[in-house]
Amino acid sequence: MKEKLKKFRFTRKAFAYPYMLFLLIFVVTPLVLILANAFIYDGKFSFKNFAIFFTEKSSLVVLGNSILVGLLTTIICIVVGYPAAYFLARYSASKIFVLLFILPMWVNFLIRTLATKAIFVSLNVPLGMGTVVFGMVYNYLPFMILPLHTVLSSIDKNYIEAAEDLGADRFQVFTKTILPLSLPGILSGITMVFIPTISTFAISQLLSDSTVFLFGDSIQMKFDQGLYGVGSVMSLVMIIIVLISNFVLNRFSKTNTVSGGRTLW
């Protein structure tokens, strides 16, 4: 035993063991349980849970609404976040302004959402889909700005100067040089906004007084009702949507990198 302790060294591999144990207990094990529960109905192996979910119209409608809210939130975050990141990247004092965007993230998102709800109530703004989308944009906008700011700040100014020397105006410089080079930041922002939005549940409940149900709300409700099988199926559907979204974005990112390289040559 003493010889084994003497041979043991604190290598990088040794420091990875606690993290691997954490992943095994809190990530792998829950996923295995969800997968198992999805195929168990009345204590037997069955596809009944899948049949219940795909024949339940309300769940499919909620899934469609969640994807719609996710797309709308992502589009608004891009429209608002890209100009903000673009102008922040142009000024030397941008780090201070970026810090102002990050500061709200230091507060728990539940507290931020409750504060947003209090503002809407004080202004007599009716709670509904509009306030839910606003809350989504408010909570996830920094996740769009930060990757965009990082990419835009790292763009070599020689590319812009070369485009201007070749006769390009400001619009052409932006559309043919800056925008293509900033696509990796856009794709990262989409990943960090769209995927959490379609799976969230607390924001929609608080900012709509539980009148707007998204897919995360439905999953929570199924588990609260003891319908672990159907809830597990819905969780698997959400995981599949996340994996497909990541796959499409990664493929698009790789395609853009290859075509961008050919354009530069």
Image (tube, rainbow, N blue to C red):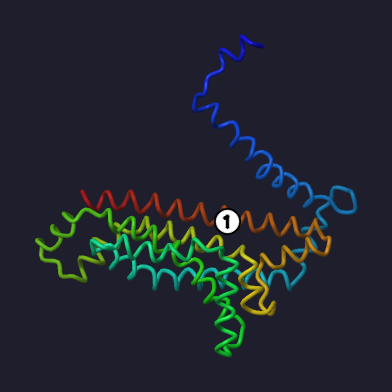
> Which residue is identified by label 1?
242
Image quadrant in which you'd find residue 174 = bottom left
Q: Percent position (x, y) of residue 207? A: 61, 77
221, 173: nearer the viewer? 221
Q: Percent position (x, y) of residue 2? A: 63, 11
Image quadrant in which you'd find residue 112 = bottom right
- Label 1 residue SS: helix
Q: Percent position (x, y) of residue 148? A: 36, 60
Count up the numbered dots.
1
Of all residues shown, which one is farthest toward the bottom? 124
Q: Is residue 123 above or below residue 262?
A: below
258, 20: nearer the viewer? 20
Seen at 67% across and 42% down, the residue is 28
Mark 1 crowd level (few <14, some 14–19, many ≥20, 10 Å Cα): some
Seen at 56% across and 65% down, the residue is 109
Seen at 66% across and 38% down, the residue is 24
Q: Is residue 128 above or below residue 75?
A: below
- Decide if residue 225 is on the left or right side of residue 204: right
Label 1 sits on what residue type? Answer: Val
Q: Percent position (x, y) of residue 210? A: 69, 77
Image quadrant in which you'd find residue 153 = bottom left
67, 118: nearer the viewer? 118
Of all residues shown, which one is farthest toward the top? 3
Seen at 39% across and 57% down, the residue is 147
- Decide if residue 40 is on the left or right side of residue 182: right
- Decide if residue 195 is on the left or right side of residue 187: right
The N terminus lies in quadrant: top right
